[in-house]
Amino acid sequence: MKKYSCLFLFFIVLVFSCSPWRSFEKTNRPQPSPDYANEKYWITLPWRHDIGDTIPPGCIIPEDQKDAKADVFYVHPTVYLVGKNWNGDLSNNSLNKKADRCVKFQGSIFNACGRLFAPRYRQAHLYSFFDTVAGRLPLEFAYSDVKAAFEYYLKHWNKGRPIILVGHSQGAKHLTQLVKDFFDGTTLQQQLVVAYLIGMPIKHNEFKYIPLGKSATQTNCFVTWNTVIAGTESKVRNSAYKGAACVNPLTWQTNEEFVSKDNNIGGIPFSFKQIDNHVCDAQIHDGLLWIHSPHVHGYPRLGFSYHLCDCNLFYMNLRQNAKDRVAAYYSKFN
């Protein structure tokens, strides 16, 4: 525990010491705006052989992505931790490689159920989440890129196929707004298989017409959770997490029953070298997803939080669930 506490403290010091100190208006925002007609502004596209096609050893090779019946629009989490600008620069190769790794660890989960689209975007600095006043404009700026990418995808590539939205952390925040702008109560809502909005506190009534998913095959819904070590109380986190919506990814239900690790069909460690069967259990408690520490290495914890591993811990359950929901979506038309 002491090791994790020291690591968490170091992480916080790093964020604050390497954060923007000028206002958003006075910071040179990265240019140019991404032109999503140019494929270089997409981390992965279904007709390319790229990092989005990655699968861990022992995983069944998916069918040809370009022929899949569903689409997956994935938005990566924050990887911009150190820098004096409020938004990341898309010409920064180091930053781009970190975003690519997110597609490998998270986006690849969904390459078995649909065509995978993942845009590059000028993400907000992590500090934007610590200073909510100063961070509002950088986050809005980042969302404008995500919105533009989705609009281009929708106009040129979707062609009426069902859509799965996937976002983690900052990605989940942007997709929450995207759901409100494009899906909630619109005709496009009928194309929504599910929105996986992971690693952000989402309210039960976040949307007017799109409910929290409460079963493994429910469609036109959203799913969310935030993973912490068992015993963590919501009051030690931001109050937004207390009573937040939460789905257990081992059952896809919202009750607070303890679910054994026997139901975890496989996590993927950060080494991406193997599937770890029965890596952890899960139980919902007051808006948080409690787990006991994995029995294997490769799933880092910061203090009480397994935020970095929200998806990795349940990699194979997520992979299967996305396939099941696509099948359920099409079954409605048979």
Image (cartoon, grey):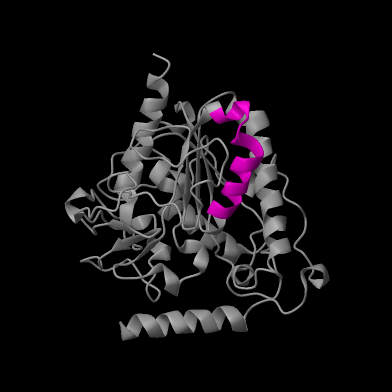
Q: Image quarter for residue 171?
A: bottom right
Q: Is residue 16 above or below residue 137?
A: below
Image position of 33 (left or right of 123)? right
Q: Where residue 265 sits in the image (x, y, percent)?
A: 23, 48
In the rendered structure, the answer to whether residue 251 lies left or right of residue 187 reads left
- Name which quarter of the figure residue 242 lies in: bottom left
The C terminus sits in image quarter: top left
Q: Quadrant of residue 325?
A: top left
Q: Name the spot of residue 192 as percent of width and height, x first.
A: 51, 32
Q: Where does residue 286 sit, x and y in percent of width and height?
A: 38, 60
- Give the magenta part as a residue range: 172-189
Query: Which residue is more in the foreground, 151 or 215?
Result: 215
Q: Do we see residue 119 in this rendering?
A: no
Say above or below: 91 vs 68. Answer: below
Left or right placement of residue 330 versus residue 160 in this view: left
At 38% across and 66% down in the image, what residue appears? 306
Image position of 248 (left or right of 34): left
Check if residue 170 falls in the magenta segment. no
